[in-house]
Every structure is written in C-alpha cells, then in structure tokens.
Image (cartoon, rainbow, N blue to C red):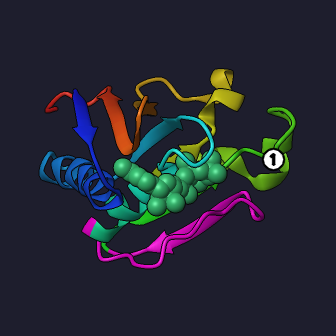
Amino acid sequence: MTYKVFSDEETELVGKELASTLEKTGISSAFIAMRGEMGVGKTVFTRGFASHFGIKGVKSPTYTVVNEYRGRVKIYHFDLYRISDADDLVSVGYDDYVADEAFCICEWSERIPEEIPDGAITVSISRVPDDEAARIIEISGVEEL
Ligand SMILES: Nc1ncnc2c1ncn2[C@@H]1O[C@H](COP(=O)(O)OP(=O)(O)OP(=O)(O)O)[C@@H](O)[C@H]1O
Ligand SMILES: [Mg+2]
C-alpha cells in the first residue's frame, strides 16, 4: 500500500491507521521495520502509531537505542542509527524485546537487515522532489492494507 502525504499530521494519521488496522485484525505483536533517510518522518509516523493506543509523547530514542511505552499494548521504539553492527543489539537485549508480546518499531532497520524477523511489516518513507513537506509512505507485509 502506498500513500502520498503533505504534512506531519498526515504522516501521523497513516501511522495511526496502521495501528488501527492491526488492532482490528487482532494483532498485538509485530515487528515494524522503518526505512528512510534522516528527518524523513519515521518518528512522526511512530508517534501517530502509538497515539492510536493512547500513548502520547513519543520522542526519538536516538540516545537510548530503545524507548518503552505502555498503553493498551506495549510498544518498543528502536532507533538503530548509532549502532555499529548487529553485535551491539545483544547488550540492548534486542532478542527479548522482539520475542515479547509487543510492537517493535525500528528506525534505521536498514542497519540490521539480517536481524529483521520473518513476517515483519515494512514502512518506507521517502521525500518528494520540490515539495518540502510531501512524503511517499510505502507499507508492506500487512494483509489488510
Ligand atoms: N509530511 C511530513 N511527514 C513527517 N514529517 C514531516 C513532514 N513534512 C515535514 N516534516 C518534518 O520532518 C521532520 C521529521 O522528523 P522525524 O524526527 O520524524 O524524522 P526521522 O525520520 O525520525 O529522523 P531520524 O532518522 O533523525 O530519526 C520533522 O521536523 C517534521 O516536522
Ligand atoms: Mg527518528
């Protein structure tokens, strides 16, 4: 499924819609691999996703690798920008997070292609030339979308 959006709010809405679709399908556990260059809107999308579950104040976990949120569901929000390789994931407890009944949303998943679980949902966000606030959001791996 591909969306074209024109503002932060619309990107949040697409994130929220994904969360709503998953919840309606009875899914409370998934790995969401986010891709896209710096400042493209991965954290904005995650904020929208979390808001569907009553979680507010999602901020970039750049300095902590992972932020944990609890609402109606658990959300683990990863930012792997600073990790140097997949070995760094061990000290973070990555496998335990991934195994938990929770949504793992992972920014910079490009850094750990071999550690993305099978069946992951992929969200790729890209810019549009000549339009500062426009984005293309491509979501794959969800049956209903
Ligand atoms: N359509 C849009 N969707 C999302 N963000 C937008 C959009 N248009 C402009 N922006 C701006 O782009 C920035 C996106 O920031 P955000 O932190 O979400 O990026 P990111 O992809 O998480 O970056 P990083 O890789 O550094 O974590 C914000 O400043 C936001 O206001
Ligand atoms: Mg971010």
Is residue 66 inside the magenta stretch?
A: yes
In depth, the one of 96 and 52 nearer the eye is 52
Residue at 25 percent of width and 49 percent of height: 14
Chief SS of the magenta region: loop
Among the 4 quarters of the image, the one containing residue 139: top left
Q: Is residue 77 left or right of residue 2?
A: right
Residue at 25 percent of width and 66 percent of height: 52
Residue at 30 percent of width and 72 percent of height: 72
Residue 105 versus residue 66 in the image, above or below: above
- Examine the rendering and report whether any part of residue 97 can be seen: no
Residue 25 versus residue 71 in the image, above or below: above
Residue at 50 percent of width and 38 percent of height: 34
**Image quadrant where one finds the C terminus:** top left
Q: Please state the horizontal and vertical placement of residue 138, each as a whole percent of the image.
A: 33, 29
Q: Is residue 65 left or right of residue 69?
A: right
Residue 19 versus residue 98 in the image, above or below: below
User: Would you name the residue on which mark 1 appears?
Assistant: 82
What segment is highlighted magenta in the picture?
52-71
